Image: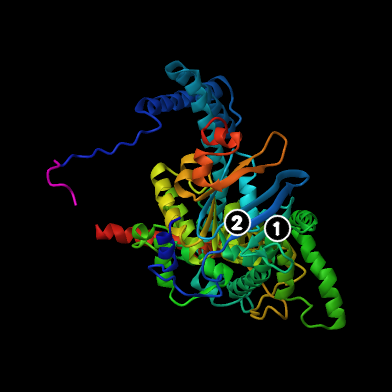
């Protein structure tokens, strides 16, 4: 392909970096002097109240020094730029810290006792005094998976349809519906559980209707009320991002409105709809309050969500963490670890399912063309 | 148009791929009668009567805001998608009013395709699926989809550039290619009329020339109505021309219409003369 006469020229790849060597040295110098100054002021001159005070003083000193040094070297504009970017990065780190420490804490507490046996038996034959490693959570995992799956089956069609109604129709009822959805998303989750309890379970038990008593399906209904507004609002926002030009193009080809939504709008918003579902899963898989008076919880396995009380992981955690015995409390941490792993797993599945098909195809094609070269 | 050209058109070199459930074959004549249009209470267009002959290219020219695009959108019932829009008058497609009671907009739009100012291929579909989108969306059947894809892309002048990557996404093409893909998508359902709303305004000169060639080729097979701001383009591609103008705070009207040569060389209205010679607008 290459013309024969052209001499081979070495290409040097360059990537201009944001910070220079001097910048990094100055920042390091500021950090060192801020630390030393803090030590001098807080420990030699004053009596430091604790490490947190030291940290705050050191950080403020560092910011001040960085600003002054940069202003001296590069001017006022560069100095305030450096100052603000440092503060922004600090903010991100501060936000990340609780999340990471929570994860590390749960893993450290739960991981030593998590055995494969957790996924093979339930708690019906485990005595409170048995070692923590004997904990069995199969019944809770099954309950959570079934209830989350049933909730998804109810919520995804309803939520997507409501979002389509809000976005793609010209009905006069869009405004009231939108207000309702907003109000519902502020509903405390325990109220959803109470509502199902008061409106369905009490009359159901009195009338002797099997479905309307303590079981996984009732929990699903309560969870549906929690998840529906989350999914509806997210899908609503995502559909609004689909350019109107695509709708017009579809209509101009002779498509009906319904066909346009189904074949053009929803496929275009596919990744966004997946995000909505992920947010919904995250919302309900860890919910405890709506389950308290609905699925009620159990120690033994119940794989039928439509009758009899059913355990789920949040209830499992709640049950054991409030017990007085320490090795029983430890079972709660094992449950918490499994719940986090489960939610990660569900996220991963949702991402794979919702990945943009055309992009995946494009990637494969670029790989192929590169191979051909 | 000379007789030899007409005879060439009447016996096309390549018969179109057969569709079932699509528009009736051939081009159709479009005629508007006393069209007026409102957005809310504001009258934006008044008394537009225009004949757009079959198998010829009609260009709508005029300064911005004179109602050309509104008029174009009235021709395939896209105007009514704007919530506050209303209109008066009638549009005849081969003699039948497309706004008559009982005529569904979907049927009308299937027969009268449209290409928009901004290229808008469906991003979630491959190039091939984009071309075939009209079949799926409008419920048209085709026995030989591969042949239809090839023919549509060829008519839009894009086949040679994309034939090796039909399964890559339509959004990955350049702007000019995307616009030709949109033309191919419109042509795939074999409409009787093709409306084009400033199809080249977002494109570079090379892509513009390519699309003008395409218009020249398909102009023998379907009726084309094109809105353009580019005088030279109108002169190059169109057989007929209509000049729209809106005086201040007044609705747009057709000032003059006729064969393109006449409009550009010997217009009867002074305002037309000024406009086509670049004196204003």
Residue linked to disc 1: B90
Does the magenta-highlighted stretch encompass residue B240? no
Q: Which residues are magenta?
A: A1-7
In the figure, is residue A80 to the left or right of A147?
left
Q: Residue A114 at x, y = what percent?
A: 52, 66
Rendered position, A173 above or below A81 = below
Which of A221/A30 is in front?
A221
Residue A248 has which mark? 2
From this view, report whether residue A201 is shown above or below residue B125: below
Pick whichever, A103 or B268, lies toward us: B268
Q: Secondary structure at mark 1?
A: strand
Can you give x and y, in whole percent of width and height, for residue B189 in the image?
51, 67
Tag 1–tag 2 contact (CB < 8 Å): no
- Nearer to us: label 1 or label 2: 1
Q: In the depicted view, which residue is nearer to us: B1 or B63? A: B1
The chain letter under disc 1 is: B
Question: In the rendered structure, the residue with mark 2 lies on which chain?
Answer: A
Q: Which mark is residue A335?
A: none
Q: Residue at x 68, y 70 (%)?
A: A154
């Amino acid at each position: 392909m290459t013309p024969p006469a052209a001499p081979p020229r070495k290409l040097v790849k360059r990537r201009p970096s944001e910070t220079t060597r001097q910048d990094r040295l100055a920042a390091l110098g500021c950090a060192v002097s801020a630390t030393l100054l803090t030590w001098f002021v807080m420990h030699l001159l004053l009596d430091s109240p604790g490490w947190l005070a030291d940290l705050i003083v050191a950080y403020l000193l560092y910011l001040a020094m960085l600003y002054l040094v940069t202003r001296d070297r590069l001017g006022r504009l560069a100095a305030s730029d450096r100052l603000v970017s440092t503060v922004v990065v600090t903010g991100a780190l501060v936000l990340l810290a609780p999340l990471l420490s929570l994860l590390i804490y749960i893993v450290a507490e739960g991981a030593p006792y998590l055995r494969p046996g957790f996924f093979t038996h339930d708690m019906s034959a485990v005595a409170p005094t048995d070692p923590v490693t004997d904990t069995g959570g199969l019944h809770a995992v099954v309950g959570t998976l079934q209830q989350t799956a049933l909730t998804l089956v109810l919520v995804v069609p309803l939520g997507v349809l409501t979002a389509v109604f809000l976005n793609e129709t010209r009905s006069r009822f869009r405004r009231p519906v939108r207000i309702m959805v907003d109000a519902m998303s502020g509903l405390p989750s325990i109220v959803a559980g109470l509502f199902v309890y008061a409106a369905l379970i009490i009359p159901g038990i009195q009338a002797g209707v099997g479905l309307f008593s303590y079981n996984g399906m009732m929990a699903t209904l309560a969870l549906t009320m929690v998840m529906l507004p989350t999914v509806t609002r997210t899908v609503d926002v995502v559909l609004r991002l689909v350019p109107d030009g695509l709708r017009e193009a579809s209509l101009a080809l002779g498509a009906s409105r319904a066909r346009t939504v189904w074949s053009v709008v929803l496929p275009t918003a596919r990744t966004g709809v997946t995000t909505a579902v992920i947010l919904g899963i995250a919302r309900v898989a860890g919910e405890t309050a709506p389950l308290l008076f609905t699925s009620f919880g159990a120690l033994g396995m119940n794989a039928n969500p439509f009758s009899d009380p059913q355990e789920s992981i949040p209830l499992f955690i709640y049950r054991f963490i409030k017990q007085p015995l320490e090795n029983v409390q430890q079972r709660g941490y094992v449950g918490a670890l499994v719940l986090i792993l489960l939610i990660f797993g569900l996220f991963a599945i949702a991402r794979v399912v919702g990945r943009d098909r055309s992009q995946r195809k494009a990637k494969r094609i670029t790989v192929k063309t590169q191979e051909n070269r | 148009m000379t007789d030899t050209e007409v005879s060439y058109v009447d016996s096309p070199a390549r018969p179109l791929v057969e569709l079932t459930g699509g528009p009736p074959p051939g081009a159709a004549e479009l005629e508007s009668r006393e069209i007026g249009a409102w957005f809310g209470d504001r009258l934006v267009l008044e008394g537009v009567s225009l004949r757009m002959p079959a198998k010829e290219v009609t260009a709508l020219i005029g300064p911005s805001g004179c109602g050309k695009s509104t008029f174009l959108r009235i021709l395939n019932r896209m105007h009514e998608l704007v919530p506050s829009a209303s209109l008066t008058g009638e549009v005849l497609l081969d003699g039948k009013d497309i706004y008559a009671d009982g005529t569904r907009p979907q049927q009308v739009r299937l027969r009268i395709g449209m290409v928009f100012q901004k290229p808008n291929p469906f991003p979630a579909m491959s190039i091939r699926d984009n071309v075939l989108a009209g079949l799926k969306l409008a419920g048209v059947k085709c026995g030989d989809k591969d042949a239809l894809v090839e023919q549509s892309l060829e008519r839009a002048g894009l086949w040679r550039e994309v034939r090796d990557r039909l399964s890559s996404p339509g959004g990955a093409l350049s702007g000019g290619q995307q616009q030709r893909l949109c033309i191919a998508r419109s042509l795939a359902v074999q409409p009787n009329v093709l409306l084009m709303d400033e199809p080249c305004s977002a494109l570079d000169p090379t892509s513009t020339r390519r699309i003008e060639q395409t218009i020249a080729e398909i102009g023998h097979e379907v009726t084309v109505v094109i809105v353009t701001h580019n005088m030279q383009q109108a002169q190059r591609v169109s057989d007929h021309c209509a000049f729209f103008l809106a005086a201040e705070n007044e609705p747009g009207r057709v000032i003059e219409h006729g064969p393109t040569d006449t409009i550009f060389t010997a217009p009867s209205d002074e305002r037309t003369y000024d406009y086509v010679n670049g004196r204003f607008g």
